[in-house]
Amino acid sequence: MSTAAVLSAPAVHSLWTTAAEPVDKIPAPTIEYAQLAPILIVVGAAVLGILLEAFVPRRARYHAQLFLAVVGLAAAFAATVGLAASGHASTQARIAAMGAIAVDGPALFLQGTILLTALVAVFTFAERRLDPAHHGHRVDSFAAEAAAVPGSEHEKSAVKAGFTTTEVFPLALFAVAGMLVFPAANDLLTLFIALEVFSLPLYLLCAVARRKRLMSQEAAVKYFLLGAFSSAFLLFGIALLYGYAGSVSYARIADVVDGAVTDVDPALASTMGNDVLLLIGFALLLTGLLFKVGAVPFHMWTPDVYQGAPTPVTGFTAAATKVAAFGAMLRLLYVVLPGLTWDWRPVMWGVAIVTMLGGAVVAITQTDIKRLLAYSSIAHAGFILAGVIAATPEGVSSVLFYLAAYSFVTIGAFAVVTLVRDAGGEATHLSQWAGLGRRSPLVAAVFAVFLLAFAGIPLTSGFSGKFAVFKAAAEGGAGALVVVGVIASAIAAFFYIRVIVLMFFSEPKPEGPTVAVPSPLTMTAIGVGVAVTLVLGLAPQYFLDLAGSAGTFVR
Amino acid sequence: MNPVNYLYLAALLFTIGATGVLIRRNAIVVFMCVELMLNACNLAFVAFSRMHGNLDGQIIAFFTMVVAAAEVVVGLAIIVSLFRSRHSASVDDASLMKL
């Protein structure tokens, strides 16, 4: 595309009208396969997963898919670590694939986080011991056949035949592939494509719950319509920024914003003087990203989707989407638009304040544990925004650390939610959780650890993360924001502690829910969550240093 | 013709689409309005491409069409499965989780 950029309008016109003059050879793109290995491995595993779905007999599919997903994600993680170890996170940072994808510290750190999160999430996807076996077949959280109408003969026969939706594994891998590209995207087109690649599988995953399928489908429709709506905004923002700068490359747009371009043709001269294109385009682009992280006022979908989606999918969406979307937002604000810091900071201040307070206050009134965690995730989006607003390298590394800490707590918390069950599936109403600590102290204690981490109590990862973010925000000149953040944290601590009190200090109901004994898969997921929470809380320094050394964007 | 006029048209189409998403109640119609917004984006891309004399915008328009097609596949699958279990595609009827 870069060669086309230097052609004048009549020259471009001649490309498709006459072949009077021979067209220059289009140079073949150079792709750095080694630097893109994490992404390519995950995409390859996802494509292989589709082929397995087509060619492997049905009874062998579950194990084949699980094996492929785990191996694919682990290999991609190893490739990420390899890239970071060979210096791509610091001195060897590169822009690969003809300027489309950045391979630098923040990208590799976030990709590693997403891959580990996804690996743990795949374990929760694969759990098959929570529900009693139907007709001798073990069942997971996903519908026997998602296309069958709930309660119909079609569905009954699918259940009887022991069908399972093993497509969830390749779908999750495709979503992970999009999420890996999203924070590394170095031009706006790649950003948009990555957004769609990770969103579309998530819409489908939301719709395939085994239990409470009407709610699940409703969640999927809401997520899909609002997600498509917001990505249309994002795309129009991209169109306006393209109109402003005449290019979708991050570096080029940054230069045009700074007025540091030398080759100004008349068309560019007229559009780059037009700040309306820049500001509206940027606002629309930011709207799309704020929707994905679930910031107020674009949070409306969050509680419904979190509640309706199958709980393993909720955990995956809540953790990994946030990491990917905040990564993309950081790159956009720090690489493309440092020249606009004075324009975006006041807006983001407002968004961060209403997000922190809105999420924390509304969460108090919730009576469903999944909705409560949804509003808590909104409040956390606000805390992370405080770190984004710092606009310093410390801001970047504090956000990286916070995202890593938050994603494991989230996956672990939702994994615990899958364990507490009654006859109708998961018992998510808070009244059903009363006295859980008396009945199964271990599960309640683990959940209490996650809640304390969400609340930011010392000795948990939540405290280290919040401290890093607020410190960066205060040093970045956002002291008032930190005050609001601490107040919101105090409000949020109230409802986390309330759940803990409910679990440990109230009488269990006689016909309350039971706690299912999971297979080693979910145990691993929860165990990893607890371990990361405690390690990042007790000895955060190594990981803070890691995030600190990964805090520089390549341009 | 001045390509700026196409930008006004694109903005108008985008606004019509966004308004439709907000006021229509049938999920299919809402979805068609989203598609209208995507097409408005395409028109803006092509118009800007003509103004700047480079092909980036036209290439992006192709990508957008492919994305829109993929979105139709996923979206219709979800909306049809909702319709089959509820016999209604109204976004107001889907309110199991309202507070």
Image: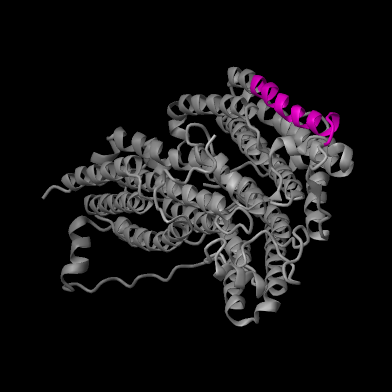
- Which one is in front, A88 or A377? A377
- Which one is in front, A436 or A190? A436
> What x and y, as percent, mark residue B45?
29, 52
Name the side, left or right, on which A340 lies relative to A481. left
Main SS of residues in magenta: helix
- Which one is in front, A460 or B21? B21
Q: Residue furthest left?
A: B1
> What x and y, as percent, mark residue A93?
60, 52
> What x and y, as percent, mark residue A187?
45, 52
Q: Which residues are magenta?
A: A486-508
Res A41 → quadrant:
bottom right
In this view, A485 is above or below A186: above
Please say whether residue A81 is one of the residues in the magenta stretch: no
Q: Is residue A282 visible?
A: yes
Q: How many marks?
A: 0
Res A143 → quadrant:
bottom right
In this view, A454 is above or below A173: above
In this view, A349 is above or below B27: above
> What x and y, as percent, mark residue A545?
75, 40
At 45% from the left edge and 37% from the top edge, which residue is drawn? A337
Please say whether residue A488 is one of the residues in the magenta stretch: yes
At 57% from the left edge and 55% from the top edge, which residue is drawn? A213
Name the side, left or right, on which A180 lies relative to B17. right
Q: Is residue A539 visible?
A: no
Quadrant, the N terminus of chain A: bottom left
Q: How is the image coloured?
A: one colour
